[in-house]
């Protein structure tokens, strides 16, 4: 168990580095690129809090990121029709184009990284990671 756990953090770091390297041609690092991709996947828009959750960061820390993406002309904030106090993040035309490029590049990176792993092994690994995620979520909720 210790050997398995010891791989998690370094693997996460190396995966982010691989994404940073693969996305370098788009002039974005992993986090802004992932944010653009996640916003693009939300057809009805995405609240900043939901983006923070999906990025694995605290809500206040996503504000400067969204500000940067907005200044870059990639993202716009729109009023949520179901809650006028809330804002939804939507991609601009430039953001949509960039999101498609990010999706393509990340798919290529995943393909390269996972090419040597059999499909049935990936299924098992994904199931294990899903169980870890569920356990960690439960522990977070318990405080």
Image (cartoon, grey):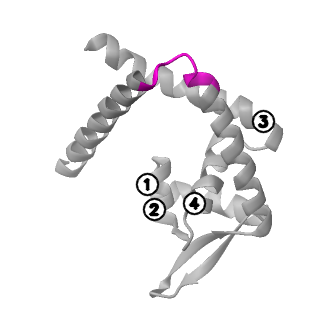
- Residue 4 is tagged as none
- The crowd level at tag 3 (other Cα within 10 Å; few <14, some 14-19, many 20+) is few
Which of disc 3 and disc 4 is earlier in sequence?
A: 3
Q: Residue at x 32, y 38 (%)?
A: 130
Q: CA distance from mark 4 to mark 3?
A: 21 Å
- Dividing the picture into quarters, in which one does residue 107 lie? top right
Q: Which mark is residue 53?
A: 1
Residue under pointer 2 = 50
Judged from the image, the secondary structure of the residue bearing numbered disc 4 is helix
Q: Which residues are magenta?
A: 112-119
Q: CA distance from mark 2 to mark 4?
A: 12 Å
Marks 2 and 3, how far apart at CA:
26 Å
| Alpha carbon distance from label 1 to label 4 | 15 Å
The disc placed on residue 41 is 4
**Which badge, 2 or 3, comes first in the chain's sequence?**
3
Q: Position of residue 133 (x, y in %)?
A: 31, 39
The residue carrying mark 3 is 24
Please provide percent x and percent y for residue 3: 33, 10
On the image, the x and y values in percent for residue 6 come to 37, 16
Do residues under tags 2 and 4 come within 8 Å of each other at their CB atoms?
no
Mark 4, other Cα within 10 Å: few <14 / some 14–19 / many ≥20: some
- Mark 1 and mark 2 in contact (Cβ < 8 Å)? yes
Point out the tag, 2 or 4, that comes first from the N-terminus: 4
Residue 116 magenta:
yes
- Mark 3 falls on what kind of element? helix
Determine whether 34 is above or below 130 in the image: below
């Amino acid at each position: 168990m210790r050997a398995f756990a010891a791989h998690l953090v370094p693997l996460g770091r190396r995966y982010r580095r691989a994404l940073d390297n693969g996305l370098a041609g788009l002039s974005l690092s992993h986090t802004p690129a992932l944010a653009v991709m996640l916003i693009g996947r939300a057809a009805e828009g995405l609240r900043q809090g939901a983006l923070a959750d999906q990025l694995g960061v605290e809500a206040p820390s996503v504000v400067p990121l969204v500000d940067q993406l907005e200044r870059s002309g990639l993202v716009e904030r729109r009023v949520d029709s179901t809650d006028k106090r809330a804002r939804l993040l939507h991609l601009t035309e430039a953001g949509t184009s960039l999101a498609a490029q990010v999706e393509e590049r990340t798919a290529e990176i995943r393909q390269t990284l996972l090419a040597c792993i059999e499909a049935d092994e990936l299924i098992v690994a994904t199931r294990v990671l899903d169980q870890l995620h569920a356990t960690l979520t439960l522990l977070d909720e318990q405080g």
